[in-house]
Amino acid sequence: MDIQNTSAIVTGAASGLGAATAAALAARGARVIGIDLSVDNAPDVDGVTYVAADVTDEAQVRSAVEAAVAAGPLRSVVSCAGVGPSARILGRKGVHDLGLYAKVIHVNLVGTFTVLAVAAEAIAATEPLEHGQRGVVVNTASIAAFDGQIGQVAYASSKGGVVGMTLPAARDLAQHGIRVNTIAPGIVDTPMLATVSEEIRAGLAQGVPFPQRLCGPDEFAQLVTMIIDHDYLNGETIRMDGALRMAPR
C-alpha cells in the first residue's frame, strides 16, 4: 500500500519507537498525527503534527482521528503507546498493587484496542484501493507476551492480550479492507533503557543470539513500513528479537 499523500496515526510518538515510526512514515510522504500524553518535548519533524491525547480516552482518541481524517485519507495506524512497570505478584511490600495491574492493562491493551476500533471506523469510510484494501493497523506487543520474566506479570498480560486480539481483529476488519498486524520487539534501545548503566546494557546485548546488540527504534520503524508495503501480510504477530528467548529473570 502506497502511503504517500495519505494520513497516518502513531501513538507514543513523542519518543522511542513511536518517534522513529512517525519520522519514517513522514519521510515516505505521509501526513502523520503523532499522539502522546505529553508532546512538549517531541522532536520537530517535517510532516508530523503532534496531538496531546490519552489513548484510553475515547473522546480524545476520536479528536485525534478526526484530525488525521482531515489531513487524510487515513490509511495507516501504528500503536506504540505503553507503560511497563515491574512488580512481582508477591513482593517485599506484599501483594501486587491491583490498581497498578489494572492500569497497565488499561493503557497497553484497552488503549491499543480503543485506537484500533476508533481508527478502523474512519478507515472503513475511505475509498477502497486495489483489491478493496483501505488501510492497515500495526500494534506493538513484546516478546514478554511469550517469555514474560519475573516481575512482568502485568506487562506480559497486557502484551499477550495485544497478540491475542491480532487475528480476530484482522478477521473482523477484513470485510472493510483493513489489515491488522502486530510487532513483538525484543530489547530495543529506547529512552526506558537510557537510565541503566553501560554494564547492564552490554549484558542485555550479549544475551541476544544474533545480532548481538540492542535493537534500534529505526529498525522497528523499518518493519512497520515493510508491513504497510506488504499487502498480503495480515493477522500476523512478528517477533523482532534477534532470536532472543528471555530467561526467567
Image: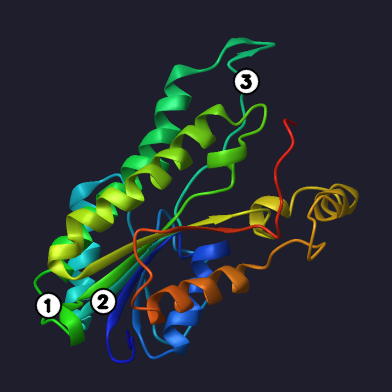
Q: Three-letter amino acid code at disc 1?
A: Thr
Which label was assigned to residue 23?
Answer: none
Q: Is mark 2 on a helix, strand or loop?
A: strand
- Mark 2 vs mark 1, CA separation in Å: 8 Å
Quadrant for residue 218, please give it.
Answer: bottom right
Q: Where is residue 224 in the image (x, y as percent from the top left)?
A: 47, 72
Q: Which residue is drawn at 65% across and 10% down?
A: 93
Q: Looking at the image, can residue 62 be seen? A: no
Q: Residue at x 33, y 88 (%)?
A: 2
Whichever of labels 2 and 1 marks the residue nearer the N terminus, that label is 2
Of residue 104 and residue 130, the one placed in the foreground of this image is: 130
Checking the image for residue 88, the label placed there is: 3
Q: SS at mark 1?
A: loop
x, y percent for residue 227: 43, 73
**Is 28 rendered above or below residue 55?**
below
In the image, is 133 to the left or to the right of 86?
left
Is 1 situated above or below 249? below
Query: Pointers 3 and 1 in contact (CB under 8 A)?
Result: no
For the point 56% across and 40% down, which residue is it? 146
- Residue at the spot x=54%, y=64% of the render? 17
Q: Along the horizontal axis of the image, is 51 left or right of 159? A: left
Dot 2 or dot 3: first in sequence order is 2
Q: Between marks 2 and 3, how big is the CA–CA gap?
A: 40 Å
